[in-house]
Amino acid sequence: MRVIAGTLRSRVLHAPHGHDTRPTHARVREALFSILGPMTDRTVLDLCAGTGALGIEALSRGASHAVFVESAKDALRALARNVEELGLDASSTIISSDLKASRPRLRERSPFDIIFCDPPWARTTEILRTLESIPIGGLLSDSGRFILEHSAKFEMKPATLSLVELVDTRRWGDTAMSLFAAAPKATATAPDAAEKVVEGMK
């Protein structure tokens, strides 16, 4: 697996052995970044980061900083190795934590212009519940985008998450990407108020 474009083009990315970490295919990454457009000076959050392929691709294409969140030990080792060998220490932050426990640290670093999330497909519904509790829309900049990778068979509903709006879902073989935009005034909502909105929906 390699970085596709930018200053780190063709550099190798290390991945752990086994099937627990499933890096995004190169053709899907290329298509996704074509949709998202220029990465210059954008701040990026890579949730369920695995090898860090999406966040690293964004850095290679000009993003100013990327925060990676991962809890699996083997994936963390591969991620840390990739960041170190590619010389990205100064522009990267690695948070060794699950999504729910990382919430306070993510709020401190928000807002983000781009948020990626590529969880194990079998856990998509569980991860969506966790993202709702954060809530993910409260971490986005006004023009930010949240991208969730999931199985093409998974039905993503427009009202899946609060504080964000489903813009589009693209499919490439068995892989799909759902793109969300920050809902109007989502980033102006205080964290406590956002939590009350979520609680009111339960």
Image (tube, rainbow, N blue to C red):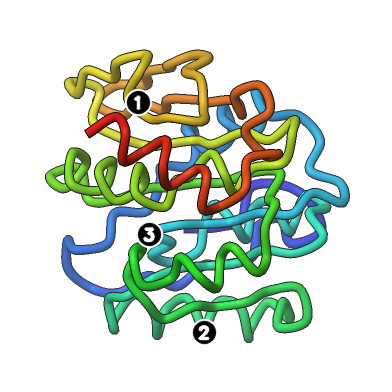
Q: On the rendered structure, is 46 left or right of 143?
A: left
Precedes in sequence: disc 2 or disc 1: 2
> What residue lies at 30% left-to-right and 74% top-to-bottom?
16
Q: Is residue 96 above or below residue 29?
A: below
Q: On the rendered structure, is 126 left or right of 82?
A: left
Precedes in sequence: disc 3 or disc 2: 3
Q: Amino acid at mark 2?
A: Arg
Percent coordinates x, y for residue 85 in the rendering? 63, 83
- Within the image, what quadrant is residue 84 found in? bottom right
Q: Which mark is residue 176?
A: 1
Precedes in sequence: disc 1 or disc 3: 3
> What residue lies at 23% left-to-right and 30% top-to-bottom?
151
Secondary structure of the residue carrying numbered label 3: loop
Along the line of sight, the residue nearer the viewer: 72 or 18 = 72
Q: Which mark is residue 81?
A: 2
Secondary structure of the residue carrying numbered label 1: strand
Marks 2/1: CA–CA distance: 28 Å
- Within the image, what quadrant is residue 78 found in? bottom left
Q: Residues within 10 Å of mark 1 (few under 14, many from 20)?
A: many
Marks 3/2: CA–CA distance: 17 Å
Secondary structure of the residue carrying numbered label 2: helix
> What residue lies at 74% left-to-right and 30% top-to-bottom?
143
